Structures are given as structure tokens and as C-alpha cells.
Amino acid sequence: MPNQVEPKLIKALYEELQKERFVTLATIDFENGGPNVSAISWVLAKNEETIYFAVDNRSRIIQNIKHNSSVVINLIANESTYSISGNASLKEEKLNEVPLKLALVEVKINEVRDVMFYGSKITVGPQYDKTYDKDAAARLDKQVMDAMRKA
């Protein structure tokens, strides 16, 4: 049985992307043309067709997107693993109301594909801890997510 393919986020994935969470992002490296994978956490579904994420505006991710807009976001949620492909563009060079120099990237979704191997499901999603000041991390996370919601 082939895995499910959708043109936009299903409700469960949209809801999962309303809070900070671990995802991986694949871009095309601007120097060597090969794949480049990064882990990011400031990600937000603006609607079922659009995802925003924030990264340091000096990041290699930004350089890669400026040269090739094709991206894939890998999301583990809803007891499965999803490949969300789309075209990314720099929406804002610097997010307002955030003390760091973070760029806001907009991804227009082309396809959402369930890529979990047959006969299995995810029972525990990825978890992580912030290794710096917990209060400062919580404040920064709230600032970034609020700024993305306003964009």
C-alpha cells in the first residue's frame, strides 16, 4: 500500500506545527549542490499551505535558499514521519521584537508525504532540552513564536 500524499498539511500536522518543535530541514548546498540537513525548532504552520521558520540570518540555510528555493521539512508527528516539500523564500531579513538577528523564512508547501516505512508507527517523538538558562530560553522561544504569528 503506498503512503499517503497530500497537497497541504492535514489537520493533525497543522496542529502539531502551532508550537515550537524539533524538525529537520533539507536544503541544497549553494557551494557543492549536495543535500544539507539542519535541525531547527522555531517552526510554525501559518496555514495549511504555508510554514514559517526562523533561523539566524547568517545561517548557511539562508544562503542555500537564496540559491535554490527547494526545501524539505521532515516532521515526526501523528505516529508517523512526514516529508513536507516546498519552495522557501526569505520573508523578513530580521524578525522584529526578537533580540537575535533571526530571519523569517516562508515555505509554500507543494506536497506532504507520509514516508514512514510499512507496518510501523512512531511510539515516542523526539525530545530535547535547552542546555542554557531555562528562563531565558522560554522567553526567547515565546518572543520568536509570537513574532512569527504576527508576520
Image (tube, rainbow, N blue to C red):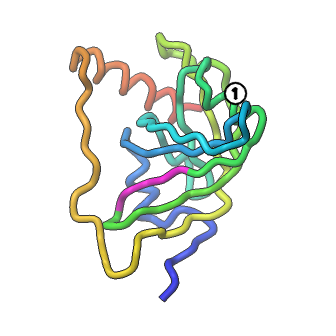
Most frequent secondary structure within the magenta stretch: strand
| Rendered position, 108 above or below 82 | above
Is 65 displayed left or right of 37 in the figure? Answer: right
Q: Nearer the viewer, residue 90 or 30?
A: 30
Q: Position of residue 42 (x, y in %)?
A: 45, 34
Q: Residue furthest right?
A: 67
Please tell me which residue lies in front, 97 or 38: 38
**Is 19 or 114 nearer to us in this picture?**
114
Q: Amino acid at mark 1?
A: Gln
- Asked if residue 127 is positioned above or below residue 64 in the image, the reply reads below
Residue 60 at x, y = what percent?
A: 61, 26
Q: Residue at x 62, y 56 (%)?
A: 85
Out of 120 and 21, give the one closest to the viewer.
120
The quadrant of the rendering that contains the C terminus is top right
- The residue lying furthest to the bottom in this view is 1
Task: Read off the residue under disc 1.
Answer: 63
* Neighbour tally class for label 1: few under 14, some 14-19, many 20 plus, Cα within 10 Å: some
Q: Position of residue 29 (x, y in %)?
A: 67, 37
Q: How many marks?
A: 1
Residue pictured at 57% horizontal, 74% vertical: 5
Q: Secondary structure at mark 1?
A: helix
34 shown above or below 56: below
Residue 74 magenta-drawn?
Answer: yes
Residue at the extreme top:
99
Looking at the image, which residue is at 57% across and 45% down?
Answer: 26
In the rendered image, residue 21, in percent from the top left (x then y), is placed at 36, 42
Verify whether residue 37 appears in magenta: no
In the figure, is residue 38 to the left or right of 109? Answer: left
Q: Residue at x 25, y 37 (%)?
A: 128
- Left or right: residue 112 versus residue 79 is right
Please provide the residue range marked out in magenta. Answer: 73-77
